[in-house]
Image (cartoon, rainbow, N blue to C red):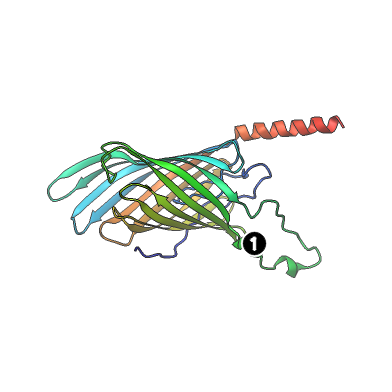
Amino acid sequence: MFPFKKIALIALFLAPFAHYGQFTDQINSNRPGETMSAYGVGKNIIQIESGIYGITSHHNLLNYDVNGFGLDATIRWGAFLERLEVIADIQYQNDQLDSNFSSTKRANFRQTNVGAKYLIYDPFKNYEKKVNIYSWNANQKFNWRQFLPAVSLFAGANFVFEGNPYAFSLKSSISPKVMLITQNHLGDGRWVFVTNIIADYVGTDYPSYGYVVTLTRGFSKKWSGFIENQGFNSDFYSDMLVRGGAAYLLSDNLQIDASISTNFKDTPTILYGGFGVSWRYDGFYKKAMSRMKNANKKKKSNR
């Protein structure tokens, strides 16, 4: 059983939720951490989150080294319903494995996953914090609602292709991945705590079970930072990693980020870092909002 250490993440400061779907004034990206937020991008929104990373690894017992780079990309689409988000997540890696007796170049998909996330419970829905104009102390009272998390479920499928050197089996396979997601907004709202509980490759010979915990903190309107703890356990491979980094908001629809990750074991040691970008297209959302406003104007004029 791998140890659980409390380490956190700081990603982008979330803007207040609009009344239409889960759209926010500024882009809400899962990068540069590995957690999936409980909230979606919003109905009619298309968002792309991508990055490049370098990795180095050394196994003390088996005495091999791995050095390489990779590309990861996530496509998020707010589809059909306000609470529903369709997600495609891929990771491609190119590296070289060197041991005492051989040197092997590898290049393939480390991850290919497609699924959907549904928001089950939103503690802020139909809730408005009331301001007491007569009492400053009343307005500063501790708000217990922050301990009520938003809750989502994710269900998807892993696609592994034949001959993949990163997979536990060289055969092609499709296996389920499910995830329970919770998200709390703490304190003044700039702190966001996210938890993912994951069951991966379910039904295969090597199912994996794990978690990711993150804490988000926005330092300003532009800057945010994060720390994160991730652990997973299977008969094929178990580990625990920590990562940290920062994100910078270039515009309401564009964010850049950087991060670094490591672990605490030497079978193998892992160190990798990368840079990324997140971009959101909200043109379909704005058109839908415009149609709604025009429809409301017509209703009022016909009264």
Q: Is residue 218 visible?
A: no
Numbered circles on residues, count: 1
Which sits in the foreground, 197 or 259?
A: 197
Q: For numbered disc 1, what is the local secondary structure?
A: helix
Which sits in the foreground, 36 or 204?
A: 204
- Which quadrant does the C terminus fall into? top right
- Which quadrant does the N terminus fall into? bottom left
Q: Eyeballing the image, is 151 above or below 290?
A: below
Residue beneath disc 1: 145
Residue type for callout 1? Arg
Quadrant of the image occupied by residue 18: top right
Relative image position of residue 67 (x, y in whole percent) = 26, 47
**Residue drawn at (61%, 32%) of the image:** 284
Which residue is outermost to the front? 203
In the image, is 116 to the left or to the right of 138? Answer: left
In the image, is 28 to the left or to the right of 95? Answer: right
